[in-house]
Amino acid sequence: FDEIGEVTNREKISKIVSGQVLVKNHQFVQISTSYPDPSVPFRKDQKTLQEAMEKDWDREADTSLCLVWAQDDLSETFEPETWVKSNPLLELEDKKDILLKGLIDKRNSDLLQGTLHDFQTKNLNMWLQQDVDSYLNLADVEKAIIPEFSIHGQRCYIGIDYSMMSDNTAIAFVFPYLDDEGKPKWHVEQHSFVPFQRAGSIDAKEKQDGINYRELEKYGFCTVTS
């Protein structure tokens, strides 16, 4: 399944793998570069398998093989000598010069046009958020995730972002606290209400915003409303 990174739900994938259960030594190969939406199933599968590789004592994922060619950090956007991580063809002497020049030209062109995120996503194989100018960086958000937090007895600030037309309405709960080292931290829980009447359908709303709201609703992050 080539470029599976643009598939926003598991329906197509489920149909394929469910039909292979009686096939001896069956294989299902997923291939893709990164895409603007980091919430797609392919990205989640990639993260799950990377975590499994780090837990070598746990053999539950032994029937899967995960190979990732990607940069380690956004700062490497300006370090062409590291691009072999996401572009292994740079190891081939007969292709290196042409490919490297093409990559540098693409980076410089996107930089001038303000679309550097396109180069970082498609050429350096890095998962970002949709808009390079977004307030929060995806990597920073992922680093801030903690497994659990007790809200009982905590001071709480509540904020509401109310929509007037087709925008989403959101409510956020912010809990300021001190960590084990006495450093100030803030735990945030948020829920969005996603209207689609003005867009015409939830499909149109998802395409308009570039977000798979129905998938997020399954995890309790939002409620899709008419």
Image: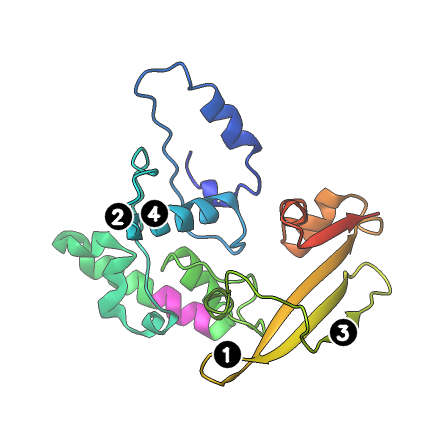
Look at mark 2 in the image and give the residue it sits on. Answer: 56
Identify the disc placed on residue 179.
Answer: 1
Spot the residue most to the right: 164
Look at mark 4 in the image and give the residue it sits on. Answer: 52
SS of the residue at dot 4?
Answer: helix
Whether pointer 4 and pointer 3 mark residues with C-beta atoms closer than 8 Å, the reply is no
- The residue segment tinted magenta is 105-111
Separation of residues labelled 1 and 4 (CA atoms): 28 Å
Give the side of residue 110 with respect to residue 70, left or right. right
Look at mark 3 in the image and give the residue it sits on. Answer: 159
Residue 106 is inside the magenta segment: yes
Separation of residues labelled 1 and 2 (CA atoms): 30 Å
Q: Amino acid at mark 3?
A: Gly
Q: Amino acid at mark 1?
A: Asp
Q: Quadrant of residue 170?
A: bottom right
Give the side of residue 26 with respect to residue 96, left or right. right
Q: Which quadrant is the N terminus positioned in?
A: top left
Whether pointer 1 and pointer 4 mark residues with C-beta atoms closer than 8 Å, the reply is no
Q: Amino acid at mark 4?
A: Ala
Residue 32 percent across, percent down from the top left? 40, 44
